[in-house]
């Protein structure tokens, strides 16, 4: 009996010691339901990359190698100075830290990070592209971004990458033939459009196919840009091993502070952030109107409403002639939502991975800091267009700061380019 009491006493003392340690560290135990939710947010829950049936070379190492070279090559621009990496800067988590994207000119949108973007079914803020390669084509001929033209790109590719291109896609058209001018594009200047109109339809298709293949190689490279484990992920791993609580004092490199944990509880609870920012990439890949203020000096941006129309009209969508997918493999595009109460003025939910390192925020960089973002959602707002989904959260200033502190824990190492 005495031995039993000694065992019970020792067990009680151990329990008291554990409780005291947890209390001092501010790390209360999580419920099983909460733990299950946290596990869905961890990078350990991230599935393998989904295939891109519209891009036959999406996972070909040769395409990755070619795409990487093209991504960093400024010759694919009107002034020879703008590469994809000009706005998608590797050291800045493939964003640029600017309010608006700046290439040859200035665009009306903030540069989205490319980290983990291959998991999304939609691309750009309004989802006007349904594949990475279709998205990669857009800035190449946009006069405010790369500002170049389709035929000039084909000439540049032939001059510098003919062998690498041929190994993947077969030989390039004979661009030395006099029927191919130096510049021509259906989207360029008036002279470029006029030159394009003189090309026979078969030549137009051949040149367009070169541009598409170039974009497919770039997309193959972009698929390799994946998020790296952050302090939040190490914390969840520690929770899993410890049965629901961890001592921030003993494991400071993996545990979260008391405020960071409080912010996490608010994120998955009272603040409802997880309604849209869920899954290992902290995004539902959908479009929402959250009453983000308009950008002075620019036309009113209708977001997804216009994006859907552009996607449907694009010859580069999954169902188009340049896609490698069978129609049955284009489920997202075949069953595309084409309207709804929140489409007007709605924008894609961005990933929160590395969010503290990718300021400013929102589709046009309207909010400068994380604090501004959380406070925007806290206060609610009035949507200039469309149906406002944003309701006030009525958080205290301390709670706003705690959510901000938690968001800081989602930044991992910079992915290696």
Image (spheres, rainbow, N blue to C red):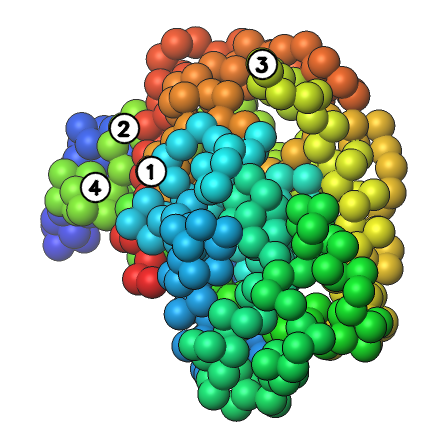
CA separation in Å, label 4 and label 3: 48 Å
Q: Earlier in the sequence, mark 1 or mark 3?
A: 3
Q: Which mark lies nearer to you, 4 or 1?
A: 1
* Of 164 and 382, the residue lying toward us: 164
Give how far apart the Cα atoms at labels 4 and 1 are: 27 Å
Q: Residue at (29%, 50%) from the top-left corner?
A: 91
Q: Nearer the viewer, mark 1 or mark 3?
A: 3
Expressed as whole percent of the image width and height from the top left, the position of residue 386 reads: 79, 21
Mark 1 falls on what kind of element?
A: helix
Task: Please give the residue where the numbered disc 4 appears in the rendered image.
Answer: 247
Which residue has dot 1 on it? Answer: 357
Marks 3 and 2, how far apart in space? 40 Å
Q: Residue at x 72, y 13 (%)?
A: 384
Mark 4 or mark 3, which has the lower sequence index?
Answer: 4
Please tell me which of labels 2 and 4 falls first in the chain.
4
Which numbered circle lies on residue 296?
3
CA neighbours of label 2 inside 10 A, class few (<14), some (14 to 19), many (20+): some
- CA neighbours of label 1 inside 10 A, class few (<14), some (14 to 19), many (20+): some
Secondary structure under tag 3 reads loop
Image mark count? 4
Q: Nearer the viewer, residue 208 or 35?
A: 208
Badges 4 and 3: C-beta atoms under 8 Å apart?
no
Q: Check if mark 4's residue and mark 1's residue have beta carbons within 8 Å.
A: no
Location of residue 256 with respect to 384 vertically, above or below: below
* Nearer-the-camera pick, 367 or 391: 367
Q: Nearer the viewer, mark 2 or mark 4?
A: 2
């Amino acid at each position: 009996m005495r031995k039993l009491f000694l065992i019970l006493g020792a067990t009680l003392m151990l329990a008291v010691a554990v409780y005291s340690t947890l209390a001092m560290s501010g790390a209360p135990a999580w419920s099983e339901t909460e733990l299950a939710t946290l596990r869905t947010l961890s990078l350990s829950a991230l599935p393998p990359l989904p295939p891109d049936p519209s891009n036959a070379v999406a996972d070909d190492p040769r395409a990755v190698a070619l795409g990487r070279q093209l991504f960093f090559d400024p010759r694919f621009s009107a002034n020879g100075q703008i590469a994809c990496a000009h706005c998608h800067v590797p050291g800045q988590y493939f964003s640029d830290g600017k309010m608006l994207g700046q290439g040859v000119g200035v665009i009306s949108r903030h540069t989205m990070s490319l980290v983990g973007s291959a998991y999304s079914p939609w691309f750009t803020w309004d989802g006007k592209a349904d594949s990475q390669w279709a998205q990669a084509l857009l800035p190449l001929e946009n006069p405010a971004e790369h500002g170049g033209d389709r035929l000039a790109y084909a000439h540049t590719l032939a001059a510098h990458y003919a062998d690498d291109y041929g190994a993947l896609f077969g030989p390039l058209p004979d661009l030395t033939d006099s029927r191919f001018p130096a510049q021509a594009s259906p989207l360029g200047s008036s002279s470029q459009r006029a030159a394009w109109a003189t090309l026979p339809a078969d030549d137009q298709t051949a040149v367009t196919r070169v541009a598409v293949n170039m974009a497919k190689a770039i997309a193959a490279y972009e698929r390799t840009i994946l998020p790296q484990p952050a302090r939040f992920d190490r914390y969840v791993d520690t929770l899993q091993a410890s049965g629901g609580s961890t001592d921030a004092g003993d494991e400071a490199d993996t545990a979260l502070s008391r405020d960071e944990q409080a912010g996490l509880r608010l994120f998955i609870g009272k603040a409802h952030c997880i309604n849209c920012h869920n899954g290992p990439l902290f995004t539902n890949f959908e479009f929402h109107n959250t009453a983000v203020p308009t950008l002075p000096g620019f036309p009113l941006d209708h977001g997804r409403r216009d994006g859907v129309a552009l996607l449907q009209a694009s010859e580069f969508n999954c169902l188009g002639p340049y896609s490698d997918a069978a129609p049955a493999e284009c489920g997202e595009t075949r069953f595309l939502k084409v309207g709804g109460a929140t489409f007007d003025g709605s924008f894609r939910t961005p990933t929160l991975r590395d969010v503290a390192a990718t300021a400013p925020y929102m589709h046009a960089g309207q909010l400068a800091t994380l604090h501004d973002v959380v406070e925007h959602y806290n206060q609610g707002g009035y949507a200039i267009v469309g149906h406002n989904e944003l309701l006030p959260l009525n958080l205290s200033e301390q709670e706003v700061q705690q959510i901000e502190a938690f968001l800081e824990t989602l930044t991992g190492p910079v992915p290696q380019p």
